[in-house]
Amino acid sequence: MSDVISWEDFEKVDVRVGRIVAAEPFPEARKPAIKLTVDFGPEVGKKRSSAQLTGNYTPDVLVGKQVVAVVNFPPKRIAGFESEVLVLGVPDERGEVVLLSPDREVPPGGRMF
């Protein structure tokens, strides 16, 4: 079991739904990755992310997909690319990332609670 956190700590994490509007290969990354642009609606706007998704996804199938992401981490520089949000996923039986997404369409920018 992981460390227990307080409710106040959990409330600091801003997790929102966005729609992938652009995806492209990221061959410069040390580990295989895809560059994403995700639209989180008018409050947060469009943000970019580097995601290690190549085991289950290609850029063309990602565009239009709704995803869940943490939007309040500081930006992280990855091979000259500024990743602004952390798109969330879980490993499948091979250890490859499967994206988390709502099970029905929701407005972009919706915050998890």
Image (cartoon, helix red, strand yellow):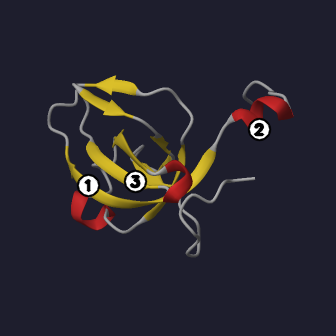
Which residue corresponds to the image point at 69% horizontal and 53% vertical from the top-left? 112
What residue sits 85% from the left and 35% below the top? Answer: 7
- Are dots 3 and 1 in contact, CB under 8 Å? no
Give the crowd class for mark 1: few <14, some 14-19, many >=20 residues within 10 Å.
many
Residue 33 to residue 109: above or below: above
Outermost residue, front side: 42
Q: Quick one: SS at disc 3? A: strand
Name the residue rendered at 32%, 49% in the picture. Answer: 36
Instruction: Identify the residue position indicated by label 3 in the image.
Output: 38
**Which quadrant holds residue 77?**
top left
**Which labelled disc corresponds to residue 11?**
2
Mark 2 near mark 3, Cβ–Cβ under 8 Å? no
Indicate the secondary structure of the residue bearing disc 2: helix
Measure the C-alpha gap from mark 3 to mark 1. Answer: 9 Å
Q: What residue is shown at x 51% (from left), y 57% (from top)? A: 42
Q: Looking at the picture, which amino acid does disc 2 mark?
A: Glu
- The residue wearing badge 1 is 23
